[in-house]
Amino acid sequence: MTETATAQISITDEAGVLCVRPMGRIDAAALTSHWDASAARVRTSATQSMSVDLSGVTQLDGAGLGLILGLEYLATARGCVVRRQGVTEAHARLLEMASRGQDRTLRAVNQGFLEHIGDATMSIVAYVKELVRFRGELMLALLAAIRNPRQLRWGDTMREMAVVGAHAVPVVALLGFLIGGIIAFQTMAPFAKYGAQLQVADVVGVSILRELGPLITAILVAGRSGAAFAATIGTMKVGQEVDALRTFGIAPMRFLVLPRFVACVCMTPLLAVFADLMGIAGGSVIMMSEGFSFRQYLNEVQVAVDASSFLQGLVKAGVFGALIAVIGCQRGLATAKEDGARAVGDQTTKAVVSSIVMIVIADAIMGVFFYTIGI
């Protein structure tokens, strides 16, 4: 047993159980005085069970929490089963809050490669399940709004359409124009070797309308609007505004999610059309600089693409918009209000990354599907 004027920690072996009894004021002074001896005793013990009795603790602060949780971790790391006794309600809340983040950190540090893979797989499976559940709940709200259009908050929907669509036009126009010009510029030299410079227009038209127009637009919308959805709803969750809505009988799905979903699904295809036009315009600049007329370029694009290419891009953009809205809003509602502003930032980051990953996966799946059915 080691003692100070304010605290003592008794560690004894009783019938194969290592009994740890901190008593008195367990604070920074206790941590400084008792940690080395207590940690060595717990680390070298051969017992397979440890009991932590907190009934004698009169005061517990952050340093004391670190002392207790550190001893428990040392015992757990060597396969010891740890249980607590004499924990007051106040101490239980402190221990729960302190161990919430520490458990994840300590476990991650000591995990092996296969354990990391297993945890990551389980996290992905759990997230996909939650996403499917959220999507189903959203579809029910959407069907209810279709049956009764007054349930949709049209004012909020129009404002979100302006934010998602009109406010994104300049950056979509710039990137679409540059992407079209870059594709034409990079393919001009290889095609020139075979005297097929005019076929550069085919590459620009097909790649922009089928793939790059919807894809670039979706990534931009995910970075702008998907992040905004997660941050706005996450901030409301932290500020308990979402709880207030539920208290007043207002469903967050109808009040917060549905207007953003409708706006994103409607505006993303329109932005993709604008990106298509600007991409083709960007390609025309490079072609005209090589001596081709705008009419020659446009005729070649019309030969290379048809209505199916255009509709394929629209369908992809609509699906991408739905994914962005669902993921952004779900991440916002999943924000842990206890973690404050940091949780909002984490969920916003996850919303953008998850949206981009899901967009690429959906694009690959739809590309294979359209190819299989001959479109």
Image (tube, rainbow, N blue to C red):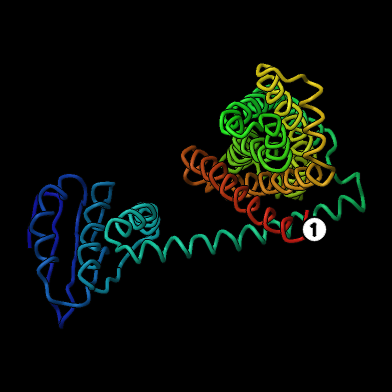
Q: In this view of the protein, which residue sits in the foreground, 61 or 329?
A: 329
Residue 256 in sight in this render = no
> Which residue sits at x=35%, y=66%?
114
Image height of 81 relative to 256, above or below: below
Q: Which residue is mark 1?
A: 140
Q: Label 1's element?
A: helix
- Badge 1 crowding class, 10 Å Cα cut-off, few under 14, some 14 to 19, many 20 or more, is few
Residue at image x 24%, y 71%? 51
Give the image location of residue 141, x and y in percent.
80, 54
User: For this view, does 349 lie left or right of residue 306?
Assistant: left
User: Does 268 sit above or below residue 369?
Assistant: above
Q: Residue at x 52, y 48 (%)?
A: 336
User: Quick one: 30 or 203, which is closer to the camera?
Assistant: 203
Q: Amino acid at mark 1?
A: Leu
Which image quarter: residue 292?
top right
- Image location (x, y in percent) of residue 147: 92, 53
Judge by depth and name the residue closer to the eye, 331 or 173: 173
Relative side of 71 to 280, left or right: left
Choose top left, top right, bottom left or bottom right for residue 169: top right
